[in-house]
Amino acid sequence: MVFLGEYRHTLDDKGRITVPSRFRNVLRDGLVVTKGFENCLFVFTKKGWQEFASQIQKLRTLKKDARTLSRFIFGGASEDDIDKQGRVMIPNSLRSWAQIKKDVVIIGVSNRLEVWSEANWNKVESEAASSYSQIAEELADLGF
């Protein structure tokens, strides 16, 4: 499945977010949440996590940057299941990393979901809005 779309939800008092209903079936066998870049969270299916993890594991552990990235990705990861109401618990350490207090935006990004604090998402989206064309051109030079 390809994750698509933007969804707005609220963190409940127990630190849970509601997974958009269209993704619950895909995530019913469990998921992995970890720190993402720009202070968001990455949410993977178990299979998607294995694919992502294998890419990180291919990095040369003799390189300091590779070790640092591995610690960041694996040290912050948490496995969980969706409850009967379609919610998933976000550990406090991950909520703190993503600066999530109440309002969240869930973005479908191909092989994963990203969970953002609404304030951080609005800032990132606003900053990127003027550069999408330039980014596409630069990626075209890389064979995109």
Image (cartoon, grey):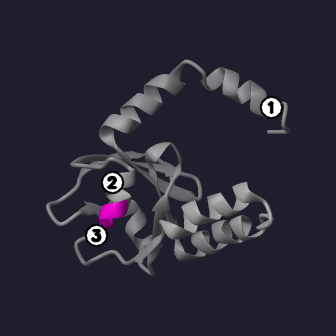
**Where residue 46 sits: x, y (%)?**
54, 76
Quadrant occupied by the C terminus: top right
For label 1, the residue is 140
Which of marks 2 and 3 precedes in the sequence?
A: 3
Q: Position of residue 115 (x, y in %)?
A: 40, 52
At label 1, counting other C-alpha atoms closer than 10 Å, the crowd grade (few under 14, some 14-19, many 20 or more) is few
Three-letter amino acid code of the residue under disc 3: Gly
Q: Nearer the viewer, mark 3 or mark 2?
A: 2
Q: Report the front residue among 40 and 61.
A: 61
Residue 132, position in %: x, y?
61, 25
Horizontal side, residue 112 vs residue 11: left or right: right
Task: Specify the segment rendered in magenta.
Answer: 89-93
The image shows residue 103 at horizontal and vertical percentages of: 24, 45
- Residue shown at the point (48%, 69%) measured from the top left: 77
Q: Is disc 3 in contact with disc 1, using a CB cutoff of under 8 Å? A: no
Q: Residue at position x 84%, y 31% from top?
A: 141
Residue 137 among magenta residues: no
Mark 2 — residue?
96
Picture disc at residue 87: none
Looking at the rendered structure, the kind of residue marked 1 is: Ala
Residue placed furthest toward the top: 130
Q: Secondary structure at mark 1?
A: helix
The residue identified by callout 3 is 86
Between 62 and 46, the residue placed more toward the observer is 62
The image quadrant that residue 85 belongs to is: bottom left
Whichever of labels 1 and 2 marks the residue nearer the N terminus, that label is 2
Residue type, mark 2 in image: Ser
Mark 3 surroundings within 10 Å by alpha-carbon count, few (fewer than 14), some (14 through 19), many (20 or more):
some
Q: Quadrant of residue 30?
A: bottom left
